[in-house]
Amino acid sequence: MSGENWTHVAMSDDSLVADALLQLRHSEPMKTSNASLVKLKWSVRQRRSRKGDQTRASPTTPLSLSDAMSLSGGGGGITTVEGLEESSATVKPSKTFRSKVSQTGALTTTTLFKRSRKKKTLAELKDEEVMLLKESKGLKNVQASFWLSSELARMRDLVEEQRTRNNALKKMKAESQSALSCKRSFQQGSSFLLPDLNMPLDTDMSPERRYLCGARFMSETPIYRIVRADHCRYSSRDESVGRLVVRNVKASDSEDDEVLEKMVPTDLMTPTGTIGASQGWVATLKDNVVWLQDDLNPFGSDSSPKRISLPRPETLPDCQTQMVTNVALSSSPEDEDCILAVKFVGAQLSLCRPAENNNQWVNIRIEDPGFFSSRVMYSNNEKMFSMLGRGGTHTGSWDLENHRSRSFDYRTYKEYLPSEMADMSRCSRSEHLVEAPTGETFMVKWYTDIFWNGPDDGVRRWKRFMVFEVAGGDAHATNDIEELCIFLSTKGEPFCVEASLYGLTPNCIYYVGDFDYGKVNIGNNERVGGYGFSPAPYFIPPQSS
């Protein structure tokens, strides 16, 4: 029966169809040759080729079968076997097989990438090396700058800490010295203490502090400046006298000068009437005889002024004893241990004990010409008489037996504008050495200039002060001496006091020259004062009775 007839018969007879299906169900499967079996393998999806890349193959479809053949012998078809769909094949991808075209494309891309890097020339390499070295140096400089700034900050902190500690030690030393002196005087009963209500309340009530507490002696006198002597009458045929006129240094501008009843010889009020003053005593030189007298002391006796005559000093070879620079006393000339120093212009320095009955001069020849015009002062720290050399570069110290000298090293010096330096170069300058009650030593450079306008044309007046703190062999410029004030005069011995004990302005220099006087703030060099001739340019320091 042909296939077409069997179909027509099967459509009319269902049993024929059922027999055909049973036969097919129980029949054996058809065997195929091994050569005809197709090996299926999954390949990895390759990247799509880029535009212009002719070496790469065309992209393949995801999870496509490679080297697969259809049953009909086609090379690109995909055939299912035993009814299996192509998406249901569970074949592992090959680990070793790659398309030759893909491998060639990858190698070609790598080769092109390597060839695309341009080689640098020697000059470019050198420039690059120089640039790297500069960057390295810059980094090192930044590191060094950072280290230096940190070190400077650390040093500033250390200096501030040391300065605070030094100030505290100075204050403790001053308080201790004042406390001991107050306690000693209180125990002796020579005077009583007057508390200063302006001082801050202190909670430290140790035995020494009970005697301090900002107090000073009631018997201690104020500081006065000698103004003049008003003529009033003749006390004798041979001597002209006048009433002493003084001024309290803390008096306001609205207050008048004080005219005392004390009579003084008017010849002391001349430029050549005195040769110096120290400890409230003035010295005169008459007929080559040195006299010490308290006539200008406002608290000296009016009826019986004290006058001490000394023998004639011997004039050393190549020296003179007619012109005097100034004088200095170690203490009151009535004390047995007091020593008087007279500095003559030139090489001679003469020392004498005024309280001795058979007092004799000890004449010292100074070999260093830098001291020929220097002023002498007594150093309580060294217990010797000291002088500054010319320019303030060194000091010399003498007593009745010894002599020693010391040079200064100016560690810090204030900078001035060229105009200020030009002004100072036209000025005259004098150097003064002064000691504070707290133990510090200061050097003051006093600049004076000639003024040509006003009634006193051609006279020298104050121009500027420069202050240095001397410690060992170093001299440091300073504009702050804290709670101290300095007193300078053209012929008197300088001295220094604590401003708070006398109601004075701290960090100031009170001065009196031949034609001017005033108060100068050390911090800003501002002056408050007046002008006029001073016949006896002296300050009378505090006196204790």
Image: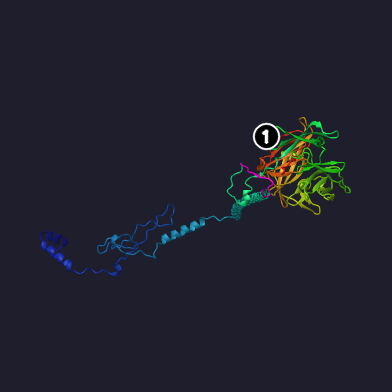
Q: Element at badge 1?
A: loop
- Confirm whether the magenta stretch covers residue 208: no
Q: As drawn, is 22 to the left or to the right of 257?
A: left
- Write the residue at 25% across / 64% down: 82
The three-letter amino acid code for the residue at tag 1 is: Ser
Q: Quadrant of residue 497?
A: top right
Q: Please provide percent x and percent y for residue 359.
A: 84, 49
Q: Residue 209 at x, y = what percent?
A: 62, 49
**Taking the image as drawn, is residue 148 in sight?**
no
Check the picture and name the quadrant holding the N terminus. Answer: bottom left
Task: Give left or right: position of 158 versus 539.
Answer: left
Tell me which residue sits at (32%, 63%) in the image: 68
**Residue 189 lies in the magenta-colored region:** yes
Residue of label 1: 252
**Magenta-drawn segment:** 186-197
| Residue ranking furthest to the right | 317
- Across and down, in percent, residue 95 comes to 38, 65
Residue 145: x percent and y percent? Answer: 61, 52
